[in-house]
Amino acid sequence: MKTYPTERIRNVALVGSSGAGKTMLAEAMLFRAGVLDRMGGIEARNTVCDHEPEEREAGSSQVMALASFEWNDHKINLLDTPGSFDFAGEQWAAMAVADVVVLVVDATAGVDHTIADAWRRAARARIPRLFFVNKLDREYVSFDSVLEQLTETFDSGVAPLELPISEGPDFCGVADLLTDDAWLYEGGTITETPIPAEMADRVNQVRESLIEGIVVADDDLLERYLEGDMPSTEELERTLGAGVADASVFPVVCGSATVPIGVDRLCNYICGIGPSPLQARPMRDTAGEPVVLAGDGAPALLVFKTTVDPYLGTVSVFRLATGALGADTVLVNSRTRDSERVRTLFLLRGASSEPASDLAAGDIGAAAKLADTATGDTLGDGSIELAPPPQPEPMLSFAVVPRSKADEEKLSVALRRMCGEDPSLRVTRPMETRQTLLSGLGDMHLRTSLKRIERKFNVGVDIEDLRIPFRETITAKAAAEGKHKKQTGGHGQFGIAHVRIEPLPRGSGFEFADEISGGVIPRQYIPAVEAGIREAMENGGKHGYPVVDLRATVYDGKHHSVDSSEMSFKMAGRLAFNAAMSEARPVVLEPVSRVDVRVPGECLGDVIGDLSSRRAIVQGTDSGNYGEQHIRALVPESEIVRYAIDLRSITGGRGSFTADHDHYAVLPGAPS
């Protein structure tokens, strides 16, 4: 593939619900572009973009796939994204580097929460959008109904550019509202014809509304139109393109990816009215400032995807934010400040690759075997650090353990490399539970990641029950003596400490007080008493959980001039604390999280009812955009271990939540 200048590059993200036909649309676009001799299929497990074994086994996309191809002397970098929220991190990354988002709408299902969520994210970032209404060849579909949903759900900028010729099994072409022509797809050929007579009234009505919506964006065109001078198709397309780039007009086109019908016209629209990197919003640095896209400046690129290829090794997929990039270029990693040599450049098409000599500013490419570059890193001259793609917060955690001793040595490396491929995964090891936690967006996300770890890194991983970090505290004052006395011949061990403990307000932690007088315990041994108490608290109280929120005071004791030592008084402090603890009415504390749940309005009652059954304290609800409701609540952590799965079930996959630790509270019904 030749090198294309910036103005002829189109970076496009395909976004939509799982099953909407995004991967087949990408397949059809590659077929119409002449890249493929024939189209693959989901059931045949041979599509270009679903190339990972786990994707083909599941029959749905799980990772973002890049497919670059040429169309009408333009280069289109197509980013096919998963539709399931379990893999939303892939969608977010693609949208962060795309210049236009194609929202693929399933005509059999209409507008759903996935489309609305993607629209909200794109609207916040002012990313240009257009709609492709897919599957119009299916039974019982209505383009008009889908169009009405789009208009009602979003805003007045929704503008249909095409109408289907027939629908359902008789769907055979599209009517172009700008040129007033029709395109028929029959017998593998595409024919330009006049619009069918039976559609004329409907086409004229929609076309008039479309033109009025376009000309209002240009004062000169509007004045001419009001005077009866009809703008030319070229003028309308130019004005429409400006509205698309400004994210104020959102064209709607239609077709079917599997036939395929209308796919070539979608490619035409992407190249004709879709923004180039020069017209679209610029990429930004970590301070939020726009980075000027200049073809003659020093190159700066953002790595937005990392993957392990069996032949190429570690592959870093990047977007060039500014400057031109050639092979064998030395750049600086802004995170490590080390030099990286980009030896070879690649263009990706699913699992296959094609070498590239150089890339223009705004283009997307890949490089293999970079020494220490991770997803989100910036490579350049060191003067720019680009903002990494945002990632959704994890909602579910698995406690993972190695399957064998050999796996134990490789597990930490495999987890680190897996998180490098998928930044929406997190690995933590809480000190209180001493478990290795792999956190992600859902059950499917985590199980798929574990399968990849086994396949790619040859590491066996099992799952164990998640431990909740309970704690203990006391509810009453108590005092006790700790005596450590041992004679073993020669110097013995002797230390006696009297310790009083009393409760502190929740969240206060631990305080130590010294009330020793008269030298009954020498000054140098007082810290040893405190160390013994701290050690006893960490090892757990009556119920075996770490002890918190109390004050311990050493107020009396005895020592021996020869046999006393720091170890003696450390043991005495520990014994005194344990004895006092059993008399101080200990209770178990459970962690409580502050939870923010986002659900469709019609699910509000069911979700609040479910939260109440989890001992939640609902603190309030707020209304969001597009009928979304936000619920704020305090919920015990033990009640939301698998809440991501249950919330998806209650809301039909439309709910999401974030949870952050808030405080500890007494566990109801716990033994004292």
Image (spheres, grey):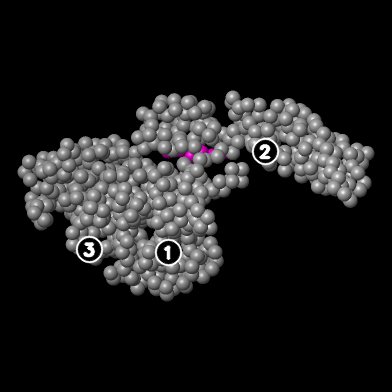
For label 1, the residue is: 314
Q: Which mark is residue 9?
A: none
Q: Is residue 302 left or right of residue 473?
A: left
Q: Secondary structure at mark 1?
A: strand
Q: Secondary structure at mark 3?
A: loop
N-terminal label among 1 and 2: 1
The residue type indicated by label 2 comes to Gly
Q: Residue at x 50, y 43 (%)?
A: 464
Q: Nearer the viewer, residue 404 or 142?
A: 404
Q: Residues within 10 Å of mark 2 (few under 14, many from 20)?
A: some
Residue 60 point in image, percent of width and height: 30, 48
Q: Residue at x 44, y 28 (%)?
A: 610
Regarding residue 267, the answer to whether it shows in the image is: no
For label 3, the residue is: 35
- The range drawn in magenta is 656-662
Residue 430 point in image, percent of width and height: 58, 45
Q: Is residue 390 left or right of residue 365?
A: right
For label 2, the residue is: 540
Is most of the magenta stretch helix, strand or loop?
A: strand
Real-space Cα separation, disc 1 to disc 2, in angstroms: 45 Å
Q: Residue at x 7, y 41 (%)?
A: 198
